[in-house]
Image: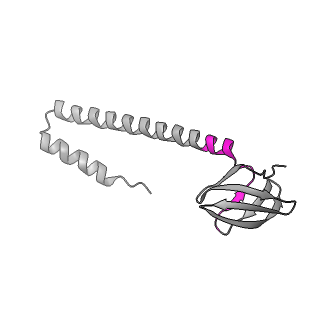
Amino acid sequence: MTQFEEGKYYYSGTCGRYFIVKRTAKTVTLKHYGKTKRYRIKTWPCGEVVLTGGAPLYASHNEEWRKRIAERETQEAEAAAAYRTAGEAADAEQFARMMNNGMSFEAAELVMNAKREGLCIC
């Protein structure tokens, strides 16, 4: 089971990082944004958890976890950029086809703008 360790940083998704100042069998003292407060440790199937009043703080969300999350965010950003680039290339190709088929620039532009306005990303 994953446990909190003194002197280490742990991360919650929305509230940032917490530093473990002190640990006993039932409590941990956390430092967060300069404030120190003691919390009771809960034992869940995934390991130890502290309910901080904001998001729960998991003992498994240590520095390694933070690096994995940062790596995954980088991969997602790269995939999104590649997707955008492919979409822009497809739009440019479609625009070029319309121009080659004798459509005026203004008419082709109207078609492309109507296409973009019709998209709904929900």
Q: Residue furthest bottom?
A: 53
Instruction: Please tell me which residue is depicted at 42% across the width and 38% down the height of the picture.
Output: 81
Query: Looking at the image, is 98 positioned above or below residue 55?
Result: above
Instruction: Please tell me which residue is depicted at 65% across the width and 63% down the height of the picture.
Output: 55
Instruction: Please tell me which residue is depicted at 85% across the width and 63% down the height of the picture.
Output: 26
Callout count: 0
Specify whether 104 is left or right of 75: left
Q: Quadrant of residue 86?
A: top left
x%, y% of residue 66? 63, 45
What range of the chain is rendered magenta? 54-69
Specify whether 52 is left or right of 13: right
The reply to whether the magenta stretch includes residue 66 is yes
Type of colouring: one colour
The reply to whether the magenta stretch includes residue 7 is no
Q: Nearer the viewer, residue 83 or 28?
A: 28
Instruction: Please tell me which residue is depicted at 76% across the width and 59% down the height of the picture.
Output: 49
Q: Quadrant of residue 112?
A: top left
x%, y% of residue 35? 63, 65
Q: Nearer the viewer, residue 86 or 74?
A: 74
